[in-house]
Amino acid sequence: MTDVSSSRSGARLDEVSKRLIELLQVDGRQSYAALAKDVGLSEAAVRQRVQRLLDSGVMQIVAVTDPLQVGFTRQAMIGLTVEGDIAPVSEVVTAMPEVIYAVTTAGRFDLLVEILCEDDDHLLDLVTSRIRSLAGVRTTETFVYLRLDKQHFGWGTR
């Protein structure tokens, strides 16, 4: 089996690629030399595998920040119910720079969007002027975050 191959349910990864992902989830700044030592490949082979994982969209290596420390004092989840086709509303909402996470759901809400705002005035403007006014948005419910209790990105692979 190759290190990364496609299937209908997503990428199929060999054990070495899975281990590289797990190591990078712990510390995305690890050197190729350190990764190579852990997985038993050459540094060049690890560099190529990591690049294929990035190019295929299986993973990203990014800096995760604390929103409070970089100027975003208000974080919230907004549940939207939509009349008609969800896709046009989702397209507009996901293009908003404040939206950091968006999913189409089954159940009480059609869309859930996580947002970062500078302050409560910014949140109020976003919800009332830009989201609730969209054609197709029937209702919104805003869940303001009081404290971030857990944010975890090291869930490994299967």
Image (cartoon, rainbow, N blue to C red):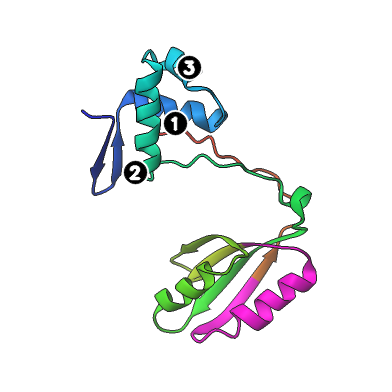
Mark 3 lies on a secondary structure that is: helix
Identity of the residue drawn at 30% across and 28% down: 14
**What kind of residue is marked 1?**
Ile
Q: Quadrant of residue 72?
A: bottom right
**What kind of residue is marked 3?**
Ala
In the picture of the structure, the residue carrying the numbered disc 1 is: 21
Q: Quadrant of residue 130?
A: bottom right
What range of the chain is rendered magenta? Answer: 115-141
Mark 2 lies on a secondary structure that is: loop
Q: Is residue 158 shown to the viewer in this render?
A: no
Q: Which of the two discs, 3 and 1, sits closer to the camera?
A: 3
Whole-number angstrom distance, CA of label 1 to CA of label 2? 13 Å
In the picture of the structure, the residue carrying the numbered disc 3 is: 33
Q: Quadrant of the C terminus?
A: top left
Whole-number angstrom distance, CA of label 3 to CA of label 2? 22 Å
Q: Is residue 136 above or below residue 17?
A: below
Among all residues in the image, which is located at the extreme left?
1
